[in-house]
């Protein structure tokens, strides 16, 4: 038996989230069934980040213990599973044999999420369900000034979902930067908000983004973020930004 | 009666091309019906470039003569039509009142097409149907050296579809450059081939791209492009690149 780590990309629009559930399609079930079909054995994945319904991934990581009838190269295993994912917007980007002490969830030392916002008056065609669509441009300088207050080690209760099962609201934000570019063809504003930490509270990124958007809209000052954080109270934070803008980009491990 | 010009964006995957046809969904029919519903009158669009099935647009232009019951601002007209395009991957980016001598097709002085290629071993999830997927990286330096021979004024018969109805195979290529970037998350190679001319022969861009790809794969030398062009014979050119990689990005007018 060998433990394998998979790097996985998916468009989350069609799924009720990563986690297997009764009666609704999940990313986990779709991949487990594809792998089981290819390898003729039950496959159980343990994932780094259980993304919510509609959330995307470009670098999700999951591991599984497999008993293979012969030696497989990583690319071969990925290719075989991908053949069974043909009809799904999911792709195994990499498969790698790892030690049995590797755990996709518990060995992770850092995660990068990117949140995409597109501001333009017209409805989206190419990026429908792949970015948060807002109608008016956001003040990025103000958002960056507000974001500074979230950096570092804090009690993030203000940005924590009521359902969050973490033992502590303390988290350390290592990076929060906002990339902006204007698209020449439609004069739209595209934001990519990059956020890194060892781990996040439930909905933390979407709650932080929803609050930063208030600053970008001029409804809040950058300093309002500081007082909201200090309040340690979810009701003092902004709304939860929609799932469709969120991408799990990368999970880092020491090995 | 006022003539209106519309700048239009669409994901061509779901359509049998721009042009209205019996029994299959077209971009033209979808927009004409949406506009007719909003404006309560028949709407007939004249388009700058009749894109083929599966070809996308970020800056298609079409005009129509409309009799409106009151003054409309461009954004208002675009918004109204977009409301009736809610369920379609089509968006009116801009609507502008123009003079009656404006013709979306005949007044065009320049067109920009971009052709996207993604090279990676794994199947595409996010860009499925939105780029040409190849499995191995292409030699971009060689492709650029080959592209030089296509620049300027030539008889492009080698890159002209048999169905082409243009009076002459002479065209003047003002730009053909290849942008490359590597995506860090999956180590894929992304190419964007930008091509500009006043007008193109039928399938000219896709035939040039298919031929340049042979150079990128090392099957042809850059100089083979020169002799293929000189042959003025479609059978001496490379294959037609798939429709899904092609985007009509912009149409320029003097006014």
Image (cartoon, coloured by chain):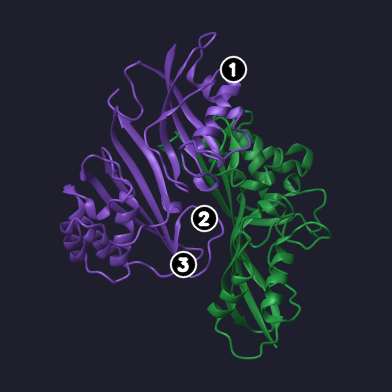
Chain colours: A green, B purple
**Residue nearest the observer in this picture, B174 or B235:** B235
| Distance from Cα at disc 3 to Cα at disc 2 | 12 Å
Q: Quadrant of the C terminus of chain B?
A: top left
Can the viewer see residue A137 in this picture? no
Name which of mark 3 and mark 2 comes first in the sequence. Answer: 3
A230 on left or right of B134: right
Quarter of the figure with residue A80 = bottom right
User: Horizontally, is B194 left or right of B79 in the view?
Assistant: left
The spot of residue B84 in percent (x, y) is: 61, 28
Residue B40, numbered label? 1
Relative to A21, say whether B169 is above or below.
above
Under circle 1, the secondary element is: loop
Question: In the rendered image of this protein, does residue B95 appear above or below residue B67?
Answer: below
Q: Reading the chain from its start, which is encountered first: label 3 or label 1?
A: 1
The image's mark for residue B120 is 3
Per the image, label 3 sits on a secondary structure element best described as loop
Q: Residue at x 49, y 16 (%)?
A: B73
């Amino acid at each position: 038996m060998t433990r394998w780590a998979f790097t996985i990309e998916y468009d989350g629009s069609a799924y009720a989230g990563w986690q297997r559930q009764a009666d609704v399609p999940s990313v986990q079930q779709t991949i487990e069934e594809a792998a089981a079909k290819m390898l003729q054995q039950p496959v159980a994945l343990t994932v780094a980040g259980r993304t919510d319904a509609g959330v995307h991934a470009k670098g999700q990581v999951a591991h599984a213990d497999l008993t293979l009838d012969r030696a497989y190269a990583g690319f071969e295993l990925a290719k075989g599973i991908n053949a069974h994912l043909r009809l799904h917007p999911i792709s195994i980007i990499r498969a790698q044999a790892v030690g049995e002490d590797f755990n996709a969830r518990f060995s992770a030392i850092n995660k990068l999420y990117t949140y995409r916002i597109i501001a333009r008056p017209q409805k989206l065609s190419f990026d429908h369900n792949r970015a948060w669509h807002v109608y008016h441009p956001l003040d990025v300088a103000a958002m960056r000034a507000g974001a500074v207050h979230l950096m570092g080690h804090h009690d993030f209760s203000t940005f924590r979902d009521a359902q969050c099962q973490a033992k502590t609201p303390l988290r350390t934000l290592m990076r929060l930067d906002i990339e902006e570019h204007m698209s020449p063809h439609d004069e739209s504003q595209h934001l990519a908000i990059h956020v890194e930490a060892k781990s996040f509270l439930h909905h933390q990124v979407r709650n932080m983004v929803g609050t930063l958007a208030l600053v970008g809209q001029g409804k809040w000052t950058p300093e309002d973020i500081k007082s909201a954080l200090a309040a340690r109270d979810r009701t003092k934070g902004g709304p939860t930004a929609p799932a469709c803008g969120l991408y799990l980009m990368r999970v880092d491990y020491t090995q």
